[in-house]
Amino acid sequence: MIKRMLITVCCVAAAFISGCATAPQIPPELQYSPPPAGVTVAKIKGSEEKSALLDNLTAFILSVDGKRVMAGRKGWDSPLSIEAGHHSFGLEFNRGVFVARAEFELDAVAGAVYEVKYATDVGFTGNNSYVDFWIIDTSTGKAVTAIKRGSVGGGGGGAFIPIFIPSR
């Protein structure tokens, strides 16, 4: 009887303790923060293609100079202020379980507004294998970087993966 009670108490305690565990947080010094007021800046934002039936196709800025942009995919359309000058960017594409990434270098010009563009074969009948990324200057619509190809991960290689939910 005491053994059973001890086991029950340990299980309940373990459930409470595991419920308190949180995912590791990114330290503030590794999170991107916009430049202070008075500094000459440029802006950059992601892009998205809406889909009526499936998840939207979204390309966004994942990191700037190795620091994580905390807005992530949700902030794809919020222009991100960056100090004028040379920067490295981590870009990401998402559609449902499909993900692709690429790294870019850009010399940002003060006052310029940049936008991430992409072309992909991710789709209902696509091969789901690549995303081509590039960055444009929105005032001219012209590319300011070369194209970089990211390989698509996730989604079981494009195959349909059935989900089995047993009945009770």
Image (cartoon, helix red, strand yellow):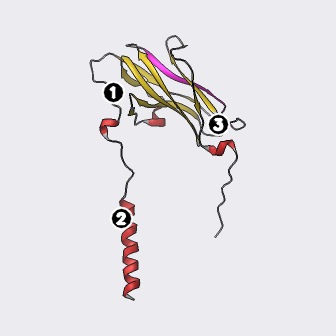
Q: Secondary structure at mark 2?
A: helix
Residue toward you, 166 or 128: 128
Q: Earlier in the sequence, mark 1 or mark 2?
A: 2
Q: Secondary structure at mark 1?
A: loop
How far across and how far down the image is residue 118, in percent?
58, 25
Q: Quadrant of the N terminus?
A: bottom left
Furthest toward the right, the residue is: 125
Residue toward you, 79 or 131: 131
Give the residue at x 39% y 13%: 111
Give the residue at x 37% y 22%: 82
Q: CA distance from mark 3 to mark 1?
A: 34 Å
How far across and how far down the image is residue 121, in percent?
67, 31
- On screen, residue 2 versus residue 130, left or right, reads left
Give the residue number, with chain letter if any, for mark 1: 34
SS assignment for the magenta stretch, majority? strand
Residues packed near mark 2 inside 10 Å, few (<14), some (14 to 19) or many (20 plus): few
In the rendered image of this protein, does residue 36 appear above or below residue 23?
above
Q: Earlier in the sequence, mark 3 or mark 1?
A: 1
Give the residue number, with chain letter if any, for mark 2: 17
Query: What's the amino acid at mark 3?
Result: Ala
Give the number of the disc on residue 52.
3
